[in-house]
Image (spheres, rainbow, N blue to C red):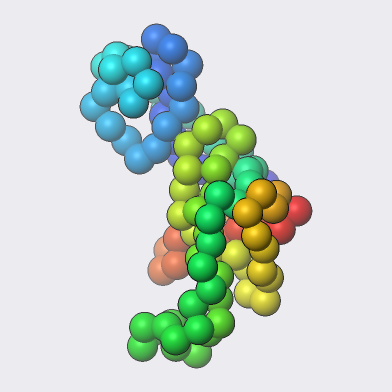
Amino acid sequence: MTKIAGYRCRECGQQFLPPRERCPSCDADAREEAEISGDGSIHSWTTIRVGPTRYESETPYTIVMVELDEGPRVMGRLAAGQQGGRGASVQLLKIDPERGPIFSLS
């Protein structure tokens, strides 16, 4: 299973990404690297039917904002051909260097 590289506050335990100097929860400056599972649920989504030139051949595709089980939210895509709505469970399939995180309905 693919994981996401994130951070954990050594003071309050909050996990977060992207990297920041201070914890978004308690404002401490003590952080450590942590793996985040990539499991979560769809918070919001939109389906792209007319894409930018470099992704035109991939339309339609769905962009999702996923609330990860550990708390952070991350934007990514649903796997080709999948559509889901708010609250649908997803898991991270891979992180594509061109497209970012790719999630699949679970």
Image location (x, y in percent) of residue 25: 37, 21
Give above or below for 10 relative to 85.
above
- The image quadrant that residue 33 belongs to is top left
Residue 9 visible in the displayed image:
yes
Question: In this image, 20 relative to 67: left or right?
Answer: left
| Residue located at (63% from left, 43% from top) | 40
Image location (x, y in percent) of residue 16: 42, 32
Image location (x, y in percent) of residue 98: 41, 68
Q: Residue furthest right?
A: 106
| Residue located at (69% from left, 53% from top) | 88
| Residue located at (50% from left, 84% from top) | 49
Image location (x, y in percent) of residue 37: 60, 38
Question: In this image, 71 relative to 85: left or right?
Answer: left
Q: Residue furthest left?
A: 21
Q: Nearer the viewer, residue 31 or 51?
A: 51
Q: Nearer the viewer, residue 76 or 34?
A: 76
| Residue located at (33% from left, 22% from top) | 23
- The image quadrant that residue 104 belongs to is bottom right
Give above or below for 48 relative to 29.
below
Question: In this image, 9 relative to 29: left or right?
Answer: right
Residue 2 visible in the displayed image:
no
How many marks are shown on the rendered structure? Answer: 0
Give above or below for 92 relative to 58.
above
Question: In this image, 41 relative to 55: left or right?
Answer: right
